[in-house]
Structures are given as C-alpha cells and as structure tokens.
Image (cartoon, rainbow, N blue to C red):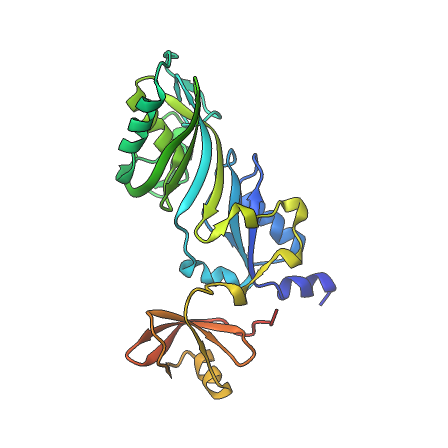
Amino acid sequence: MTPHEKLGARMNGIFIIDKPEGMTSHDVVHRIRKIFNIAKAGHLGTLDPLATGVLPVCVGKATRLAQFLPSSPKEYTGEIRFGFSTNTYDREGFQAGPEVPFDGAKDDIRRMMQSLTGVLDQVPPPFSAKKIAGVRSYKLARTNRTIEMAPVKVEIQQFELLSLDPPFAKFIVVCSAGTYVRSLVHDLGRKAGCGAHLTALRRTRSGEFRIEDAIGLDRITEAKLISINRLLSSWPSIEVSESDESRVAHGNRIRSACAGDFARILNKRGQFIAVASVESGWARPRLVLTSINSE
C-alpha cells in the first residue's frame, strides 16, 4: 500500500467545507475523494451551485453515521431581488413575466416574512433534484413540460429582513432540513405582488456545524478532519471491557445502566466502536464501527 493509499484508509470523520459558489455539492465530494484517495465520502445536505457555506462531508466509516447526525436546523443569509420571478426561482434562471415595480416598505416585507414562518406545505422549485415518477424534476423542467410538484412539510423557524435597498433585500432564515430557500423567496415575491427571486445564498449552519468551523477546499488537510471519535459527543457514552467489545463487534447486546435512547459505545482506548439503542438495562448495537484507528 502506497503512502497515499494509507492516508485514505485511515481517514474516518467529517470535513466542514465552506463550499465555493459555482461548484455542486457532488463536485466538492469528488474533489475530497481525489485529494485523499478516499473511496467512501458523502455530503450532508445539498447546496445549489449558486450557494456557498457550510457543507459537511463525511469520509470513510463516518459515512455510515450520517443517519444519526443532526441535519437541522439549517441557517442561511441571502439576498432577494424583487420585481420579477424566474423559472428556477434564482438569478440563474430566465425571467418569468414582465418586471413589476417594487414599492414595498420594510414593515410590509417583515409582515409577509412572518406569515411564511411556522410549519408550511412548501412546493419545491421545478428545477430541483426532487423525483417525479423516478425522474429528477430539473430534467423534466428542461423539456418545458408542465410539472406539478407535490408540497412537502417544512418548518421555518425564522425569516427576517436584515436590510432593504430596493429592489434588493437581505435576509436571514432558520429552517428545517429539506427546505428550499428559493421557494420561500418565490412565495414572498407572490405575496408582495411583484415577484422575487434569490440572488445570493450562504449557509451559516447545518445542525451542529457552523461557518466558523468551515474551511475552504484550498486549505483542506488531514489535520482539518473532525475524527469519528468526536462525533455525536453530546450523546451518553458506554465504555466496555475487551470481552464486551468483542460482543458488540458481533452485534450482541450488553448490560448497561446508561440513561437515554441512544448511546455511543467506546472501547478501553476511547475509540467509538458502535451506536447502540438503550432500553431496560440493555444496550443493543444498531451500527457497529470496527477497526477504527485512534486519533
């Protein structure tokens, strides 16, 4: 095994990437795979090419933990252009209809934003990765076919105006995973009666991961990897003996007085070896992570 192959084999954890504009989330994952010779890698929550900001990328055995890592809330800052909507709901699309003068006041915009908070039935943009009969909706949209997107329940915890310089406005939004900020902006434009589209978007938080911890792809090194041993650190931990470690590795339950629904199981060397569900004095392995190197 070459030194480059050894590097990829020992990397298990998460990179918090500050995604640049113009790259897809898949592009970022591909770049990381290539840099470190990693076969297994995947992101936690797609960002459109237009968007920048927090993109967590799991590598190695951490990809198996993705189902347990919190993906909400998502927090974004961005910019809206009032006056017309576009077919993609952002500045990369074609103008849909004539431009309408924008004469909204700050208080009016704030009230409309407030009306778009709470649990909503949101219709995804036609140009999105949502599937219709097994086909990505953006592929259907490119054929100029009429697309009826099914609404999805999302939660908008906060949608607030930061500044207004007509026809542009800056905002902050805190929302659940699966929310399309483009759709939120599009709906705001409809309420305003003049149309609107997204011109800029930056994700500043995804679950527990924040922009302050994110790094650019040009600065990525092995030292920037958040080790798998540090993930889910807010969960209770169960340290096991060597004999119980062997039981856990084979998927067998062990006795535990741990409180909580889920726990991390650690061996005597402090290595995170399994995720367990806890009930009635027993810890049952739900996901076993074997042969994990120490930090």
Question: Which residue: 51% across, 51% down?
Answer: 56
Question: In this rendering, does residue 38 appear at all?
Answer: yes
Q: Which of 219 and 127 is in front in this view?
A: 219
Q: On screen, 56 above or below 263?
A: above
Whole-percent x, y for residue 284 in the image: 36, 76
150 relative position to 77: left or right:
left
Question: In this rendering, does residue 126 appear at all?
Answer: no
Q: Which of 116 and 179 is in front in this view?
A: 116
Quadrant containing the N terminus in the rendered view:
bottom right
Whole-percent x, y for residue 82 in the image: 40, 20
Question: Which residue: 33% across, 28% down?
Answer: 110
Quadrant of the rendered image containing residue 221: bottom right
Q: Nearer the viewer, residue 223 or 163?
A: 163
Q: On screen, 16 above or below 259?
A: above
Whole-percent x, y for residue 229 in the image: 53, 68
Whole-percent x, y for residue 201 in the image: 48, 34
Quadrant containing the C terminus in the rendered view:
bottom right
Residue lying at the far right of the rendered structure: 2
